[in-house]
Amino acid sequence: MAINKVVDSFDEAVKDFFDGATVLLGGFGTPGGCPSYLMEALGRHGAKDLTIVCNNVGFGKELMQVVAMFTKAPDWWYDGGQLADNRQIKKAIAAFPVLASPLLVSPFEKQLRASEVEIEIVPQGTLAERIRAAKAGIGAFYCPVGPGTIVEKGKEVKVIDGRKHVLEYPIKADFALIRAYKADRLGNLIYRGTSRTFNATMAGAAKVTIAEVDEVVELGELDPESVVTPALYVDRVAVRPEAGRTQIIQKISKEEQLQK
């Protein structure tokens, strides 16, 4: 039987999520690299007490409306902040868990201030490496980022080449939700522009990796030299609706024209 990892819907893609799962959320903080439809489906699914691992927890519904007034954000943009709106998050492991503005308070920050959720702040590069370590099967590693700060608390510290390092452990996850540009039915992925960021890092770093893509092409149509994530790291592929694909492509085209 031919291998085909493409599922019929986003709801099917997340149907086996469970309460208490640890979930890697791809993207950096903008709609272009965000697995929005997968996160929206996870919101409908309703799994709770999640530990989410991400660069940026997200805005949530109310703040997204404010952001949209200034950035022309697409109406399909759904981020981790809306999982906080739904009170599905128990803990976040993130580099930028809240916004750097006292005027823009995300739902996660409100819950954090009320001691309703937990937070583990991890430097951005360390976060990427802890995810990659899980993917590579590395037991732990010493990192020079964090000594003398809150990051060091409770961790082993060792001096290497005259510099303090903290011992960091992999972040092992149950699921990874990522965003790519194109895929084939085997799950080989290519990315567009800055959407690689954490998406490519997270692919294969969880027990189940689910990719949200703009398009699925026939086997052999992807340039092997352009494939960033090989099929080995991908378990499911879900294709974005045409409306969503059209909006982002138009936005990218306008940006490219402005750059010219």
Image: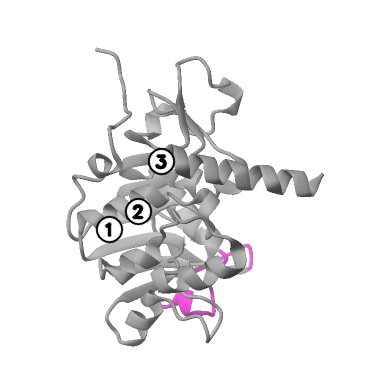
- The stretch drawn in magenta includes residue 71: no
Q: Quick check: marks 2 and 1 in contact, CB under 8 Å?
A: yes
Given residues 103 and 20, the one toward you in this image is: 103
**The C terminus lies in quadrant:** top right
**Looking at the picture, does residue 230 appear above or below residue 103?**
above
Mark pair 3, 2: CA separation: 10 Å
Q: Residue 55, how many percent across, how many down?
A: 48, 61
Instruction: State the SS at label 3.
Output: strand
Disc 2 to disc 1, C-alpha distance? 6 Å
Q: Amino acid at mark 1?
A: Gly
Image height check: is 199 above or below 157?
A: above
For the residue pair 109 and 66, the one nearer the viewer reads as 66
Residue 33 x, y percent position in the rendering: 52, 49
- Measured as percent of width and height from the top left, residue 167 is found at 44, 63
Q: Residue at x 38, y 60 (%)?
A: 53
In this rendering, position of residue 215 left or right of residue 134: right
Residue wearing tag 3: 212
Whether residue 115 is visible here, answered yes or no, is yes
Three-letter amino acid code at disc 2?
Met
- Position in image of residue 246 (x %, y %): 53, 40
Residue annotated with mark 1:
43
Q: Amino acid at mark 3?
A: Glu
Q: Is residue 192 above or below residue 31?
A: above
Residue that label 2 marks: 39
* Left or right: residue 66 compared with residue 119: right
- Going from N to C along the chain, the mark reached first, 1 or 3, is 1
